[in-house]
Image (tube, rainbow, N blue to C red):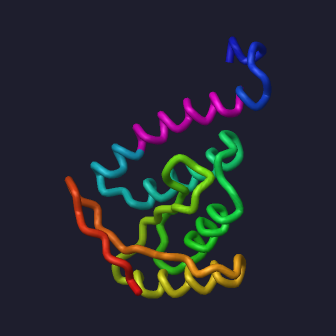
Amino acid sequence: QSQSSKLSPLLYRRAGHVISENQRVKHAVGAMRSNDLKLLGQLMQQSHASLRDNFEVSNFALNTMVECALSAPGCLGARMTGAGFGGCAVAIVKTELEIKFYNSVKDCYRKKSSLNPKIISCNPANGVTRLAPLA
C-alpha cells in the first residue's frame, strides 16, 4: 500500500494479483491437505477472476471455458492455467458427475463460441501420469 502511488493503476492491480495469488496458493495447500475441495474450488475461481481482471492475461475463449465449467454439474472450481492468452483451463469435478460435466461444458462452449473444446480427464498424482481424452 505505501508504495502504491509510485505505480500506475495497471501495475498496481498486477502487483496486487501477485500478492493475493501467493496467499491463495498458501490457502490452497491447506485446503488440499485437509481435503477441503469446496475451499480449493473457491480459491481457483478467485484466482481466475484476478488473472482476468487484475493481471489481464485471460481472453474470451478462456473466460467462456471457465464460465461453462463453473455452470456444469459437479464442478467445484475452475480457472485458466498456463501462461495466459492460450486456451487451457483446469477444473475440479466430482468423479460421479464427470460425464455430465463433460457433456455440459462441451455443449455450453459450442453454443457460446462455435468451437469444439478438447476436454481431457485426469487424476492428480504425485508424479508423471498419463492423460486420456474422454472422447
Question: Residue at the spot x=32%, y=70% of the render?
Answer: 122
Closest to the observer, 38 or 109: 109
Give residue 65's position: percent from left, percent from top. 60, 69
Question: Residue at the spot x=66%, y=62% of the render?
Answer: 63
Please determine whether, in this image, residue 36 is positioned above or below residue 12.
below
Question: Residue at the spot x=34%, y=44% of the render?
Answer: 30
Question: Residue at the spot x=40%, y=46% of the render?
Answer: 28
Give residue 41's position: percent from left, percent from top. 47, 59
Reply yes or no: does residue 54 show up in magenta. no
Quadrant position of residue 125: bottom left
Closest to the observer, 131 or 108: 131
The range drawn in magenta is 12-27
What is the quadrant of the C terminus in the image?
bottom left
Quadrant position of residue 39: bottom left
| Left or right: 74, with 15 as reference point | left
| Left or right: 131, with 119 as reference point | left
Give residue 90's position: percent from left, percent from top. 47, 62
For the stretch drawn in magenta, what is the main secondary structure? helix
Closest to the observer, 102 or 72: 102
